[in-house]
Amino acid sequence: MSTAINFASVAPGRRAVIIPATADTSLTAPTNVTTVVTGQTAGAVGTKVTEVTVIAAQAAIALGVIRLWLHDGTTHFLLDEIQINPAITGSNTATGFRATKRYENLDIRSGWTLRATTSIAQTFSISANAADY
C-alpha cells in the first residue's frame, strides 16, 4: 500500500455531452445512458470530479430527474439525483433550467465512467469539472 498522497494534477477540464431525449426511469439498470466522464480520461489512479452542471438544451422543460451513475464496465451504481424543478420555459429574455452540484469526494476509479440519464424525454447538456490523478 502506497503512503504517497495523490493530488489531482492534470486538469482535463469540462466534458460536455447531450443526453438524448429518451426517458429512462430505472433505478437499478438503466439502458439509455450517456457517458459524462469516460474511462479513457481516468489517470492511472483515477479522476476527481468536483462539479457537475446540468443545463436544459431546449426551451420548455417539464418536472423530472437527472440521475448520475458510476459504471464499472458491467454494472451501474446510482450515485446521485438532480431534480428538475420547477418546470420552466426559457426564451430570449428568460433563462432556462440550470443546476450545479458540487462534490468534495467524488473519485472515479481508473476504467470506470460517470454516466447520466433523464427521467423525462427532453434534452440536457451536462458537463463535469474533473482532473486526473
Image (cartoon, rainbow, N blue to C red):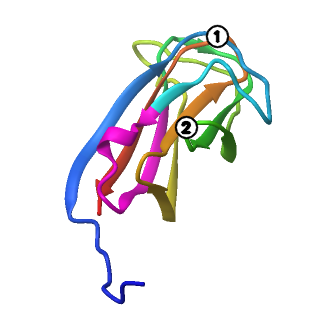
Q: Residue furthest left?
A: 10
Q: Is 5 in front, or is 79?
A: 5
Q: Outermost residue, bottom direction? A: 3
Q: Position of residue 12 (x, y in %)?
A: 23, 47
Tell me the magenta residue range. 36-54
Badge 1 amino acid: Thr
User: Is residue 117 one of those drawn in magenta?
Assistant: no
Residue 40: give x, y in percent of width and height.
32, 39
Q: Quadrant of residue 15?
A: top left
Q: Crowding at label 1, few (<14), some or many (≥20) Cα neighbours within 10 Å? A: some
Question: Disc 1 versus disc 2: distance between alpha carbons?
Answer: 22 Å
Label 1, secondary structure: give it.
Answer: loop
* 41 in magenta: yes
- Horizontally, residue 53 falls left or right of residue 66, namely left
Q: Which callout, 1 or 2, points at the residue further toward the start of the chain?
A: 1
Give SS at disc 2.
loop
Residue drawn at x 50%, y 11% is 58
From this viewpoint, which residue is outermost toward the front? 1
Position of 98 with respect to 11 (left or right) is right
Q: Quadrant of the N terminus?
A: bottom left
Nearer mark to the viewer, of 1 and 2: 2
Q: Which residue is mark 1?
A: 22
Q: Amino acid at mark 2?
A: Gly
Closer to us: 43 or 128: 43
Please determine whether, in this image, residue 90 is positioned above or below residue 102.
above
Pointer 1 and pointer 2: residues touching (CB < 8 Å)? Answer: no
Of 14 and 94, which appears nearest the observer?
14
Relative vertical location of residue 47 with respect to residue 65 in this rendering, above or below: below
Identify the residue at horizontal 40%, vertical 25% (top origin): 17
Q: Residue 56: x, y in percent? A: 51, 22
Residue denoted by label 2:
73
